[in-house]
Amino acid sequence: MESQALALIDNNAKHQRNPPGASPDFVPSSAQLRRAFPVMNIATISSGFEKGDFLVREEKGQRVYFDFFEEAFNYIAYKGYIRMTGEDEKEWMDTMNNVHASVKGGMKYNTGKLLMVLYKPLADDGEYSN
């Protein structure tokens, strides 16, 4: 599972999530792993662009500009995205800001100011086949 884990997760033990019943002698089932390490899409809402005041970036690189924050939020919420909780959202924001800052000479395009990170859990077909 380590090879599929998000590479940007802190290896500090307090940040690690373990599947239920995890121990060195126990191999968790794929269902337990999916619950402990959910697969999800993320979307972001940023501000500071010429085409529109707010930008929604979502899956597959799709970008949609809006003049009002409410329009941007309603658009992404209608698609099933949910705002991340405080710690998770802060971790994603810090990660994205660090990635943008790491580009030597600055980013080629305006990244704007990141305002909000949202996620949409991806349901496994097997979860609903009962």
Image (cartoon, rainbow, N blue to C red):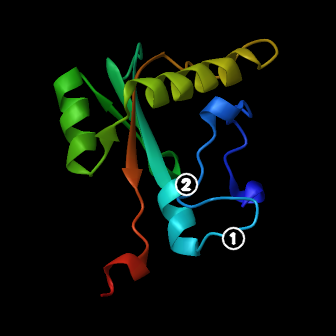
With 2 as the anchor, is 56 left or right in this view? left
- 82 vs 18: above or below: above
Front residue (pair 78, 112): 78
Front residue (pair 40, 18): 18
Amino acid type at mark 2: Phe
Mark 1 = which residue? 27
Front residue (pair 48, 23): 23
Q: Earlier in the sequence, mark 1 or mark 2?
A: 1
Within the image, what quadrant is residue 130 found in?
A: bottom left
- Visible residue check, residue 118: yes
- 11 vs 53: above or below: below
Crowding at dot 2, Cα within 10 Å, few <14 / some 14-19 / many 20+, comes out as some
Instruction: Please tell me the numbered disc located at residue 37.
Output: 2
- Visible residue check, residue 38: no
Front residue (pair 31, 9): 31
Q: Residue furthest bottom?
A: 130
With 52 as the anchor, is 100 left or right in this view? right
As measured in the structure, the alpha-carbon distance from the residue carrying label 1 to the one carrying label 2 is 15 Å
Task: Please state the horizontal and vertical placement of residue 56, each as a whole percent of the image.
Answer: 37, 34
Q: Residue at x 25, y 31 (%)?
A: 72
Q: Residue at x 43, y 73 (%)?
A: 124
Task: Please state the horizontal and vertical placement of residue 99, each as a whole percent of the image.
Answer: 69, 24
Within the image, what quadrant is residue 101 found in?
A: top right
- 115 vs 21: above or below: above
Amino acid type at mark 1: Val
Marks 1 & 2, CB-CB < 8 Å contact: no
Name the element at disc 2. loop
Task: Please state the horizontal and vertical placement of residue 41, each as a whole percent of the image.
Answer: 47, 50
